[in-house]
Image (cartoon, rainbow, N blue to C red):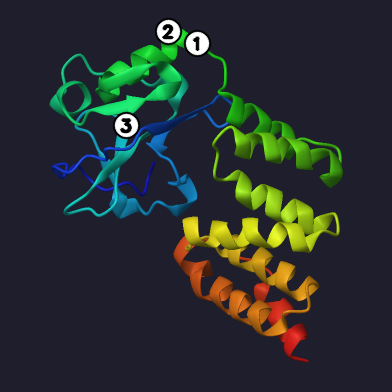
Amino acid sequence: MSDTPTHVDLPAAVTPHPLHLTVDPWWDSLHCLAFGTVSDGITAEQRLVADGCELGFIVGHPEDGPVLGFEIWGLSGFELPDEDPEVWDGPRFTVPRLGLVDASAGEIVLAVRAQLGDDPTADALHFHTAIAAPSPADAVPHWELALDAGDMRAHFGLGYTLVETGRPDRGYAHLRRYTELAPANSWAWCWLGRCCEALGRDAEAATAYERAIAVEELCGMDTDAGERLERLRR
């Protein structure tokens, strides 16, 4: 990834919590993260690249941790280094999906390849099935299944799809939660605004649109929050 920082030493504090595994062949990625951590909510400063490879450890804070897991983008072409103290002897993790306890990042990658091969995890399968669904109504059950399988990103997909299908009362909690998981995602705030507007909560909608505008430059995603806010104020 072009915006990743250069290598720095990992903080000592490792998350004691089991990690959630997502293997996504469509986006050629692997995410092994503490439950409740989502890729959209990770800043470049939180992704610490291991020496000699593109495996990025994710930390809660660049200086003092904790280590929340790791990610690999470009998984199909990723080659594990023969020797790397962080990949093989660094942070140790528990990954229930793989039956692993006290495993290094390198051991986890080997287990993924042995157990899954080129197959996706269930959350990724339903996530992309929802994206490709012929209609919002068809997408809803797959967003729900992705969420049931542990993919917190599905809060966003399920939330905006429920708004699209005329059920903003059901979508509100999912969109609100996603703004907490990924506060720098401008579209999460914009859809929360749309949901609030549909519910007649104009003041909360305006606040959400304002937040969307504020983080657009930070996350690099432009939304229509400005136009919606202008119409709302009229």
Q: x, y percentage for residue 107?
A: 29, 16
Vertical comparison of 168 with 60: above or below:
below
Q: Quadrant of residue 169?
A: bottom right
Secondary structure at badge 1 equals loop
Left or right side of 81 for 34: right
Residue at the image point whose x is 53% and y is 68% from the top: 216
- Within 10 Å of disc 2 (Cα), the crowding (few <14, some 14-19, many 20+) is few
Q: Quadrant of residue 171?
A: bottom right
Disc 1 target residue: 117
Vertical comparison of 140 with 78: above or below:
below
Q: Is residue 221 visible?
A: no
Left or right side of 6 for 170: right
Q: x, y percentage for residue 104?
A: 24, 23
Q: x, y percentage for residue 193?
A: 67, 71
The one nearer the camera, 216 or 128, is: 128
Residue at the image point whose x is 43% and y is 12% from the top: 113
Q: x, y percentage for residue 15?
A: 27, 40
The one nearer the camera, 201 or 107, is: 201
Label disc, if present, on residue 54 of the rendered structure: 3
Vertical comparison of 215 with 125: above or below:
below
Left or right side of 207 for 3: left
Number of numbered labels in the structure image: 3
Residue at the image point whose x is 72% and y is 79% from the top: 201
Q: CA distance from mark 2 to mark 1?
A: 6 Å
Q: Quadrant of residue 159?
A: bottom right
User: What kind of residue is marked 1?
Assistant: Gly
Left or right side of 36 for 189: right
